[in-house]
């Protein structure tokens, strides 16, 4: 009868040794049915559940029902178990042995994880949407100021409204690139020059932004990562840095070596920086996560004259260099 059930059923001594185990338990823990048993139970479990197993075993040995979530490894893969330990008492009230019934909860466990991950993703997307909308208002406000200043120049060919419209259209194109469909981007069937991408994203800020250094063809799969990186830095610069100040300038320096792209963002002419911020905002945290997922690194340095950000993407470009 015990061998007919899919549950793993074990008799365990108070000291934690296996006294008996049914066929399902032997298969789950890799113990031969004719082994005679007597071996310690806890070492048969994966190491990362040893502590929770020891705690439950101690409680059961003291006469309490105990439970813990465990797992087992076999050729079929990892299985997750709900382990219920029940002390069996003798006539004098002492614990004679411990009955452990382990039920396979692999499907339930995986489903719970998937639901939890879905909830986390939804919360993250909601937080990112709020962040993007808030930043959009800041960027548009900054572009209005820039457009008015450009229109006020003596040789300006257009009024502030026309200049602003052009900047908003450029910003829209940059946003489309930043949130491009991943299924298309990951196809990696087309490429774009690094300089072209930088100029496209930073076009709303006109001559206040420039790109220098070697150019190369960027792998399409890296386009979204680099676009989001530049878009976030430009947004923060409008809110806090050089692009939000009269005369402020941003230079993007590129170095392409083999498949690696090193990019440096340099700001000058903005508010003087006395100290680095104590914590990063949500946007910066998101960009850091995206860069790490692409195998890259990012470092920020707050000099008194402006922010400097160094980005390294080891596998970002094709071999064809456009110019140097």
Image (cartoon, rainbow, N blue to C red):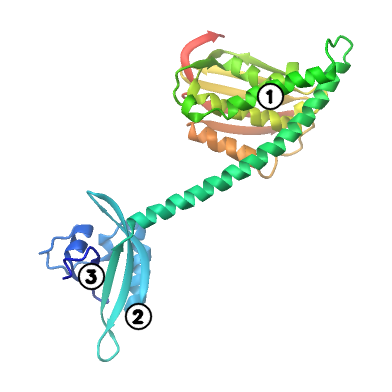
Please report the residue visible at 37 percent of the width from the left and 76 percent of the height from the top. Answer: 59
Residue 304 visible in the current orientation: no
Query: What residue sits 66% from the left and 37% below the top?
Result: 132
Residue in view at x 57 percent, y 13 percent: 214
| Relative image position of residue 38 (x, y in whole percent) | 17, 69
Q: Is residue 202 above or below residue 65?
A: above
The residue mark sitting in front, 2 or 3, is 3
For disc 3, the marked residue is 10
Residue to which mark 1 is pinned: 171
- N-terminal-most mark, 1 or 2: 2
Query: Real-space Cα distance between discs 1 and 2?
Result: 68 Å
Choose between 171 and 241: the one closer to the eye: 171
Circle 2 SS class: loop
Q: State how far apart marks 1 and 3 are (Cα).
A: 66 Å
Q: Residues within 10 Å of mark 3 (few under 14, many from 20)?
A: many
Tag nearer the camera, 1 or 3: 1
């Amino acid at each position: 009868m015990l061998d007919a059930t899919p549950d793993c059923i074990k008799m365990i001594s108070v000291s934690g040794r296996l006294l008996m185990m049914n066929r399902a338990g032997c298969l789950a823990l890799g113990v031969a049915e004719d082994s005679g048993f007597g071996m310690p139970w806890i070492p048969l479990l994966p190491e990362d559940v040893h502590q929770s197993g020891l705690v439950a075993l101690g409680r059961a040995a003291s006469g309490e029902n105990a439970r813990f979530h465990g797992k087992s490894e076999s050729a079929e893969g990892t299985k997750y178990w709900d382990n219920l330990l029940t002390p069996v008492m003798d006539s004098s009230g002492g614990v004679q042995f411990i009955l452990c019934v382990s039920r396979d909860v692999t499907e339930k466990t995986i489903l719970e994880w998937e639901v939890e991950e879905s909830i986390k993703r939804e919360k993250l997307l909601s937080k990112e949407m709020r962040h993007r909308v808030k930043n959009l208002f800041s960027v548009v406000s900054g572009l209005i100021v820039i457009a008015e200043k450009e229109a006020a120049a003596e040789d300006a060919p257009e009024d502030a409204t026309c200049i602003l419209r052009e900047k908003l259209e450029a910003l829209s194109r940059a946003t489309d690139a930043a949130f491009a469909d991943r299924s298309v981007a990951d196809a990696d069937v087309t490429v774009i020059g690094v300089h072209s991408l930088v100029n496209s994203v930073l076009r709303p800020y006109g001559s206040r932004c420039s790109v220098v250094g070697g150019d190369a063809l960027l792998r399409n799969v890296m386009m979204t990562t680099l676009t989001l990186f530049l878009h976030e830095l430009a947004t923060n610069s409008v809110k806090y840095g050089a692009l939000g100040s009269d005369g402020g300038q941003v230079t993007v320096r590129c170095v392409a070596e083999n498949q690696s792209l090193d990019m440096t963002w340099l700001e000058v002419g903005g508010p003087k920086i006395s100290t680095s911020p104590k914590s990063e905002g949500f946007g910066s945290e998101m960009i850091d996560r995206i860069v790490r997922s692409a195998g890259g690194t990012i470092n920020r340095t707050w000099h008194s004259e402006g922010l400097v950000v160094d980005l390294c993407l080891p596998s970002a470009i094709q071999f064809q260099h456009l110019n140097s």
